[in-house]
Amino acid sequence: MCEEVLKVVFPLLEGTDLASCMVVCKQWRDMAKDDYIWKCLCAKRWPSICKRPTPPTSTYYNLFKTFYKRQQRRFLPPPRLSFNDLDFYIDLWAEGRLIFSEVVSGPILQTGIKIPPPEISDMLRFHLEGPEYKMTLTIEPRCAIPLSQTVSVSVLMGRKDSNKVACIVNSALFDYIDRTSYRALAFDYLDFSPVYPFVSGIRAWISLLFVDDGNEGVIDVFGIEMDFCDAANSEEEVLWLLDMLDWK
C-alpha cells in the first residue's frame, strides 16, 4: 500500500488499531510511529494538551500509550502485618443486652467457616463460596434474634507486635436485612492514621449470617462475616488496609 494512502488512513484509526498496524511490516511500523498521527489521536482525547508546541512527554505516542486506558492493578509488596499478629474483639448487643462477646485470633478469622450449616440457602452458599475476599466466623451456640430488636456490633483489633489497638466498627446498627441473601448488614467508616491524610470513605462491613427456620419474626444467626469490599479484595490488600488504621 502506498505511503500517501497510509498517511490518510492512519490518522482515522483508533489508537489500539494503529498499534496493531505497527506489527504488520516495517513500512507500516515506520509510518505509524509518526508522532503527528499520535498527536491527532491525543487531540481527540485531550484537546487542551495539544495546544502547547511540544508534547508534555517525550512523544505524543508515549503520552497516548501511558494514559489511554486505566492502569491495571499494581503489584503490592508483601504486607508488613500478618493475621498471626492480630486479635479481634467482637461484641454484639440486642436492645443493649450482650448476646455475643469473643476474642478471636487472626488465624481463626482468616480460616473462616469451613463447613456452613447444611440448611443454609443456595444464595448464601453461593456468596460464601464466591471469589470476593471475606473473613467469617461461626457463632456457637447460634443466636435467635427477634427482628423487632435493635442489634449493634463493635469490633476492635489488637496487634501483638506493638500492643496497640485500632477500631474497625464502633456500635454500628444492623439496619438492613437482606432476606434474599440471608444477611443482616452493618457498616462503619474506618479511621486511618494521620500519616495517610488523603485516605477516607472506606467502610468495614459486618454481616450476620442466618438460616431460615420458618419463623418470620426471628433470624437464626450462625455466623459473622467481615469484609472491606470498598477497597480491599484480597488477603494482602486487607492486611495493608488494616496496617494503615489509626493504631493507638
Image (spheres, rainbow, N blue to C red):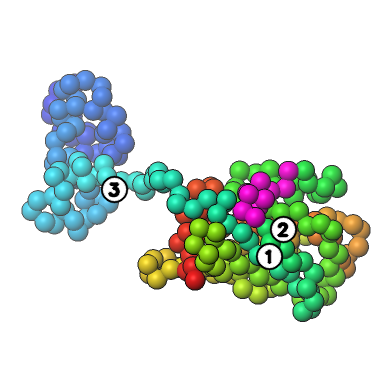
- Displayed quadrant of residue 12: top left
Q: Of 93 and 103, which appears nearest the observer?
A: 103
Gap between marks 2 and 3, in whole Å? 42 Å
Residue denoted by label 3: 67
Residue segment shown in magenta: 105-114
Is residue 112 depicted above or below 6 in this figure?
Answer: below
User: Is 112 included in the stretch rendered in magenta?
Assistant: yes
Q: Residue 138's spot in the image, x, y percent?
A: 76, 53
**What residue would you read off at disc 2?**
224
First along the sequence among labels 2 and 3: 3
Amino acid type indicated by mark 3: Phe
Q: Main secondary structure of the magenta part?
A: helix
Residue type, label 2:
Ile
Residue 10 percent across, percent down from the top left: 22, 34
Q: Secondary structure at mark 3?
A: helix
Quarter residue 137 falls in: bottom right
User: Comparing marks 1 and 3, which lies closer to the viewer?
Assistant: 1
**Residue at which label 1 appears:** 90
Front position among marks 2 and 3: 2
The residue sitting at the left extreme is 53
User: Which dot, 1 or 2, sits closer to the camera?
Assistant: 1
